[in-house]
Image (tube, rainbow, N blue to C red):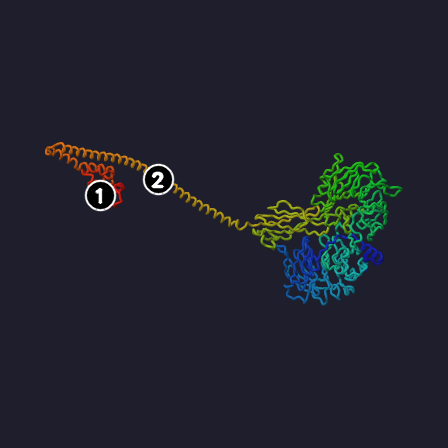
Amino acid sequence: MHYNLVGLMFLKYPLYFFLLVSQWIICQELPPIQNYTPADYQAENQNWAISQDDDKVVYVANNKGLLRFNGANWMLFPSPNESIMRSVKVVGNRIYTGCYMEFGYWIEDGYGVLRYTSLSSSMEESLLEDEEFWGISNLDDWMVFQSLKRIYIYNIKTGAINIIDAENTLFRMFQVDKEIYFQESGKGIFKIDNGKAEIVYEDEVVLNDEVINIFQQGGTIVLVTKHNGFFTANDGFLTKFNTGLDSLVNKVSVYSAIRLKDGKYALGTISNGLVLLDRNGALQNHIDQIKGLRNNTILSLMEDIDSNIWLGLDNGISYINVKSPVKVYHDNKGVVGSTYAAAIKDNILYLGTNQGLFYKPLEGESDFQLIKGTQGQVWSLQEIEGTLFCCHHSGTFVVEGDSAKQITSLEGAWKINPLSGNPDLLLQGNYDGLYVLEKERGNWKLRNKVEGFENSSRYFEILGNKVFVNHEYKGIFKLDVDSSFYHVQSIAMDTLIKGPESGIVKYRDQLFYAYKEGVFKYQPDSDSFVQDTLLSGIYNEDDYVSGKMVLDQNEDNLWIFTNSNISLLSDGSLADTLLVKPIPLAENVRDGIVGYENIVNLGEEGKYLLGTTSGYITLDVNTFQEPDLVVQIGRIQKSSKDSQSWASIEKGSEVHLKSSENHLRFSFFTAEYNKYFQPKYQFQLQGIYDNWSDWSENYSTTFENLPYGDYTFRVRAKIGDKVSSNIATYSFRIERPWYISNLMLVIYILVFAIGSFLIHQAYKRYYHKRQQKLIEKNKREIELAKAQNEKEIIKIKNEQLQEEFRSKSNELAASTLSIIRKNELLSKVKDQLLSSVEDKGSIKPIIKVIDKNITQNDDWELFKEAFNNADRKFLKKLKKAHPNLSPNDVRLCAYLRLNLSSKEIAPLFNISVRSVEIKRYRLRKKMDLSHDDNLVDYILKL
């Protein structure tokens, strides 16, 4: 029979191993455990198998379907026939799955969505009734699917499927290096060789118990059974291999088991959680629901690329960071409470909590015990010159071993500082000021209160002959105290720097003050605090959480706590320089007590204990390594202003989006699974937001109302100060709106050209018309001017004619007067002759001559010619209007037009005035004038 050394020890000293196991399971500092509930991954409770691809993306076979988790978000892909998914195996870019009456594989498309291809439906032979596929293995070019009655061997290259039938139930299938094993109920363990099943082990244990998994360790086959523990194969027979599993108090039933990369074993049980064994079978850890698991029944196990252990539970999913530099002690029982202080002395770990002072041996795994008489709030633990002091709400204690002696009963002791040059004196800060403790005959006691200062002294430091007391709301008190520390001689206040959760500490004989504005260093020369550039760069106002600074006296280091990390300050390579090492333990992860942060060295270089609200965590700074990060873009979605839904976009190549599709959402991830060290992301959108965003844990971002143009989205990640080795990018284009598309631009150009032409033509016509109008206007003006000129000419001519007419009229009048006078003269001469000469006969020739001159027509012709020259048209009008007029009538009208009276007309006719009146009367009748018409007016108007 073959036994290794540990196996022999288990057989020989079972009690020793039982005691060892009992110590481990009582109080353990466990690796971080991350739990996911069904509500987190939005699927059902049970998870039957887990696998991981080369990009570290995890796939889980869930009752609801296939779950995918990239470290940032979960996505569910329902099983093809809506049945329970029992198995999953990632090979290359394919995710093979098995469920009820179906097996096949999934491939991610360009949109980040998994698409299913059925293999079982392509077989010539039908599946058995109610067949479910519980196991999947990969061997070179073959995929092997196991149901409870058959094994299907699928050739990846040719697509051929070979079937191995079983008479009884096939419990499980196992892959050991390059060989496939399976267990058939009642027959034993078989191995597949050249497509045939060959019996390998038919020992009683494999006939009566279910084999959970088979491993190869150093050339030896190791079997894990459900109820009987481990067995090793030697010369074809199975031999019991005693392990720590056998020594657990409760008999466990193993349901899943894997061998880790470092040779250790992880066993998932039914109702008993996870059991971790080392490579020799010794029990390392037993983690159950009490210690942080989501559920005690573990259906599946998987070790990922980073050596985390994933657990598919009967109710939820968990992973354990077994290689994490962080270990967690969680006070699940609620006995210890929140840790405000910790100390190590004489290999005993002390915890000062809100519930009292607790202790336990540093090396053992026994539970914490309360030191009698210390119930209540503990504020600080300090070892000074080999004495451990406990500052308590009820007073001050000196701690020795598992007991504490109260040396003062003054309520509210904050902290204690030694007085330089006075080894027997200590200065203590209390709720109501400062007190002095004195060592007398080896015992510490209260000596006096420092008079003259009554403020709470939670933070105080001694520098030279001054005591600096920080008050969060008032500022810094600078106290000058007498040499014997009985009285405060003077108090000065610095109110320029103050703030909630601020802190003050003395480090390397220098005084530092921290609050939200930064870290300040005291300058004795100017008696003021000046901002320290190096330390203030550790955090900004947004990252500020507390000004509490903790001095590690063992290694002369200083700790500063921020919202995103904790920073360790140590000696730099150059003199008087500090080296800042940030450790990305965020406030929401480390679960500290804000303003009361505490950290203590565990006695080994680089190992520390941090108090939390429910216990503590330990940190190994030396083993902390920031991982190599690779960031990827997970999914890209688009939407529009009027749409409430989001559609996926293909990731493979640059896409052109419509102008309305200008809402984009990017999800990205880095597949790192560490509960305490979460990645942060930073992105930019070149083309509009060229500056990088602030670092954030958000793994998605949305851009809305993007204008048209070319864009490149870029994202990177970091953990701590280590940035991802790559920048994930995605380029896309948002097309111009239809109204400014190329076609529309051409149309606009054409419309513009045509419009310009038409406008030009219109303007041309307009100006042509205007020009024509101007020409016509000018022409009219010219014609008008010409007409005006002509009018003026005519006027002038008329004036000339009128003047000539007047002249002619005057001539005519003169001629007429001359004729009248001549006739009058002749008449008078005639009358004189007739009256004065008696001999009428003698004068008869003279009378005859006179009568002839009076009645001769020559005067009328002369008058007529003059009248025509003066008023050329009158006679024509008169004859036209009254053609029936006689020459004498025309003559009378001419005289009347000259406005001559009847008296003046009578001599011209050589008639009497009465005869003229008669002529006028007759003329009226010929002209058909009414009684009311004036003859002269009528003739003047013609």
The amino acid type of the residue labelled 1 equals Tyr
Give the quarter of the figure containing the C terminus.
top left
Mark 2: give few (<14), some (14-19) or many (20+) Cα within 10 Å: some
> Relative to 124, does residue 645 appear above or below in the rendering?
above
Q: Position of residue 261 (x, y in %)?
A: 74, 54
> Relative to 45, does residue 769 appear above or below in the rendering?
above
Q: Position of residue 435 (x, y in %)?
A: 82, 41
Q: Report the Cα–Cα distance between label 2 and label 1.
A: 49 Å
Q: Position of residue 71 (x, y in %)?
A: 69, 53
One can see residue 647 in this view: no
Q: Nearer the viewer, residue 283 or 837?
A: 837
Mark closer to the chain start, 2 or 1? 2
Q: How many marks?
A: 2
Locate residue 308 relative to residue 109 in the image: left or right: right
Question: Which structural element holds mark 2?
Answer: helix
Residue pointed to by mark 1: 921
Q: Nearer the viewer, residue 827 or 90?
A: 827
> Relative to 459, does residue 72 appear above or below in the rendering?
below
The amino acid type of the residue labelled 2 equals Leu
Q: Nearer the viewer, residue 477 or 80?
A: 477
Residue pointed to by mark 2: 784
Locate residue 562 relative to residue 643 in the image: left or right: right
Task: Kindly check if marks 2 and 1 are in contact, taking CB atoms under 8 A apart as contact.
Answer: no
Give the quarter of the figure containing the N terminus.
bottom right
Q: Nearer the viewer, residue 352 or 685?
A: 352
